[in-house]
Image (cartoon, rainbow, N blue to C red):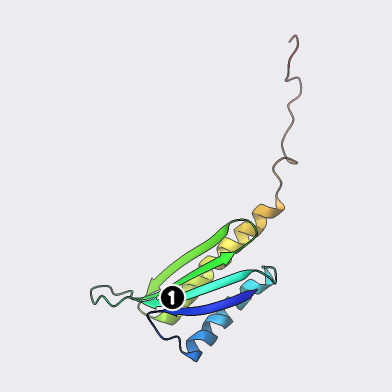
């Protein structure tokens, strides 16, 4: 897994970058090594919005692109919630790849053309 942490209109400190890398390291066990994961951290400067720290994550897989967005008053809390959402999505994605619906289809006996 290749993780890229970037900031949008906000400076990403080394401590926040390290925190995001540690939280999202659990995804590396479930994803292939060449999978690209991007985390974008931003801050909304509107004083009427309490949840101003936003963390957005994107995982580029062979199939669908997995995305999640979390906002909270604290950046670390946003990263925590984002990690939980992405883990849930990756788990579901992996389960869907293992199940092949064509092989598990039930064949009906006696159905088809011909006299009944």
Which secondary structure, mark 1?
helix
Q: Which residue appears at 62% of the width and 72% of the height? A: 27
| Mark 1 surroundings within 10 Å by alpha-carbon count, few (fewer than 14), some (14 through 19), many (20 or more) | many
Q: Quadrant of the N terminus?
A: bottom right
Look at mark 1 in the image and give the residue it sits on.
78
Q: Which residue appears at 47% of the width and 76% of the height? A: 79
Q: Quadrant of the C terminus?
A: top right
Q: Which residue appears at 75% of the width and 41% of the height? A: 103
Seen in the image, is 17 located left or right of residue 71? Answer: right
Residue 13: horizontal and vertical position, in percent? 46, 89
Residue 32: horizontal and vertical position, in percent? 69, 68
Q: Which residue appears at 68% of the width and 70% of the height? A: 34
Residue 18: horizontal and vertical position, in percent? 54, 87
Residue 2 in the image: above or below residue 18: above
Seen in the image, is 19 located left or right of residue 99? Answer: left
Which quadrant of the view contains residue 55?
bottom left
- For the image, the number of numbered tags is 1
């Amino acid at each position: 897994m290749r993780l890229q942490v970037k900031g949008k209109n906000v400076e990403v400190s080394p401590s926040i970058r390290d925190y995001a890398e540690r939280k999202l390291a659990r995804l590396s066990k479930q994803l292939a090594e060449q999978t690209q994961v991007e985390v974008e951290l931003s801050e909304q400067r509107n004083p009427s919005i309490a949840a101003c720290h936003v963390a957005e994550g994107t995982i580029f897989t062979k199939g669908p692109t997995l995305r999640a967005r979390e906002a909270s008053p604290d950046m670390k809390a946003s990263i925590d919630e984002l990690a939980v959402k992405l883990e849930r999505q990756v788990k579901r994605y992996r389960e869907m790849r293992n199940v092949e619906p064509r092989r598990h289809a039930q064949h009906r006996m006696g159905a088809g053309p011909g006299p009944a």
